[in-house]
Image (spheres, grey):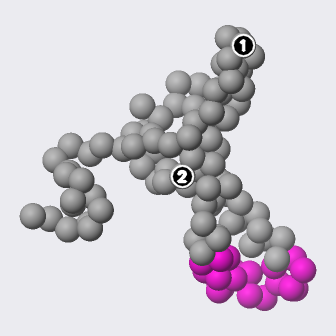
Amino acid sequence: MQVVACPQVQFVSTEDIPESIKNNEKELEMQREDILSKPENIRERIVEGRISKRLGEMALLEQPFIKNDSILVKDLVKQTVAAIGENIKVRRFVRFTLGETVEHAKTGTEA
């Protein structure tokens, strides 16, 4: 349910996001007009904060839990580990979209 509720989620954690995407996000943020007039050191911190937020939106474990938005998914996993005494690790997820086939999902085309 969490994956379906958050369509922008593409990765399990921020560590799983490729450097190319991180660099691309940084380039895009550095070009924004609202920070071009700021000093370089302040601009870097603003960009880092925005990138961190954007990468968090792309990572499943950084999402607010849909049934209780006061906790993140990673915190829910930690609470569950503590409650049941077993180690839990989210390794991957798959999102199924009604009417979409595997070939369409990979190529982004329609039949």
Residue count near mark 2 (Cα–Cα under 10 Å), binned few <14, some 14–19, many ≥20 = many
Residue sitting at x 20%, y 68%: 109
Q: Does the magenta stretch include residue 27?
A: yes
Q: Where is residue 100 in the image (x, y as percent from the top left)?
A: 20, 51
Tell me the tag on residue 85.
1
Residue 33 position by quadrant: bottom right
Residue 35 position by quadrant: bottom right
Residue sitting at x 19%, y 52%: 101
Residue 26 vs residue 67: left or right?
A: right
Image: magenta residue range = 23-43
Residue sitting at x 57%, y 32%: 65
In the displayed structure, 66 sits above or below 54; it is: above
Q: Is mark 2 on a helix, strand or loop?
A: loop
Q: Does the magenta stretch include residue 96?
A: no
In the displayed structure, 88 sits above or below 7; it is: above
In the displayed structure, 105 sits above or below 87; it is: below
Residue 52 position by quadrant: bottom right
30, 4: nearer the viewer: 4
Q: Where is residue 17 in the image (x, y as percent from the top left)?
A: 60, 60
Q: Where is residue 39 in the image (x, y as percent from the top left)?
A: 87, 85
The residue lying furthest to the left in this view is 111
Amino acid type, residue under disc 2 in the picture: Phe
Tell me the tag on residue 67.
none
C-alpha span from label 1 to label 2: 26 Å
Residue 53 vs residue 104: left or right?
A: right
**Disc 2 marks which residue?**
11
Residue count near mark 1 (Cα–Cα under 10 Å), binned few <14, some 14–19, many ≥20 = few
Q: Where is residue 43 in the image (x, y as percent from the top left)?
A: 81, 79
Q: What element carries label 1?
A: loop
The residue lying furthest to the top in this view is 84
